[in-house]
Each structure stands twice: as C-alpha cells, then as structure tokens.
C-alpha cells in the first residue's frame, strides 16, 4: 500500500509540475531530478513551485535567474 501511495505521489508531482508552469517559456525536453515532497515555495517570478527542487529545475530549464522569494504559495492578489 505504501508503494502505491509513493508512486501516486510521484505521478501527481510530475503532472503538477507540467501544469504549474515549472517548465514553460520555451523550455523543451529539459529533465532534471525533482523530489516528490510537497513543500510549496514562491519563486521570484511569481510562480508557485511544488518544492525548492522544482524551482531549481525551472530555473535551469528556462535559463532564467529564479530565486525563492518565500515558503508557501505565491499570493495572487
């Protein structure tokens, strides 16, 4: 049962990364390791990432200087 939950979390993390804009703005076929933990961070670009490793991956793949602004989801107000 734990293994099934683990794989479901990995799939959800991958799907979330693709839909959250983590690999956008011209990045194609860019792969990097992203941990499966959910620990939301707000990037300096105003995008919420599932965790710091997803933010680093987005910065690498988009070749942009993206830093962590703060822990938690970005404010959309």
Image (tube, rainbow, N blue to C red):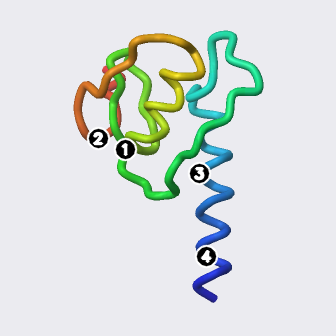
Q: What's the mark number on residue 32?
A: none
Q: Position of residue 60 (x, y in %)?
A: 53, 22
If the image is split into quadrants, where does the N terminus sit? bottom right
Q: Residue at x 44, y 58 (%)?
A: 37
CA gap between label 4 and label 2 equals 23 Å
| Mark 1 and mark 3 residues within 8 Å of each other at the beta carbon | no
- The disc, 3 or 4, on the residue closer to the chain's N-terminal end is 4
CA gap between label 2 and label 3 equals 16 Å
- The disc, 2 or 1, on the residue closer to the chain's N-terminal end is 1
Q: What's the mark number on residue 13?
A: 3
Q: Is the residue 41 above or below the residue 14 in the image?
A: above
SS state under label 3: helix
Q: Nearer the viewer, residue 32 or 46?
A: 32
- The disc, 2 or 3, on the residue closer to the chain's N-terminal end is 3
CA gap between label 2 and label 1 equals 5 Å
Q: Is the residue 19 above or below the residue 35 in the image?
A: above
Q: Nearer the viewer, residue 29 or 24?
A: 29
Near mark 1 (Cα within 10 A), the count class, few <14, some 14-19 or many ≥20, is: some
CA gap between label 1 and label 3 equals 12 Å
SS state under label 4: helix
| Mark 2 and mark 1 residues within 8 Å of each other at the beta carbon | yes
Residue that numbered label 2 is attached to: 72
Residue that numbered label 4 is attached to: 5
CA gap between label 3 and label 4 equals 12 Å
- The disc, 4 or 2, on the residue closer to the chain's N-terminal end is 4
Q: Residue at x 64, y 34 (%)?
A: 19
- The disc, 1 or 3, on the residue closer to the chain's N-terminal end is 3
CA gap between label 4 and label 1 equals 20 Å
SS state under label 2: loop
If the image is split into quadrants, where does the C terminus sit? top left
- The disc, 4 or 1, on the residue closer to the chain's N-terminal end is 4
Residue that numbered label 1 is attached to: 40
């Amino acid at each position: 049962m734990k293994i099934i939950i683990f794989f479901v979390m990995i799939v959800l993390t991958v799907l979330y990364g693709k839909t959250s804009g983590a690999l956008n703005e011209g990045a194609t076929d860019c792969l990097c390791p992203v941990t499966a933990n959910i620990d939301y961070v707000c990037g300096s670009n105003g995008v919420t990432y599932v965790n710091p490793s997803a933010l680093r991956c987005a910065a690498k793949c988009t070749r942009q200087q993206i830093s962590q602004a703060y822990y938690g989801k970005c404010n959309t107000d």
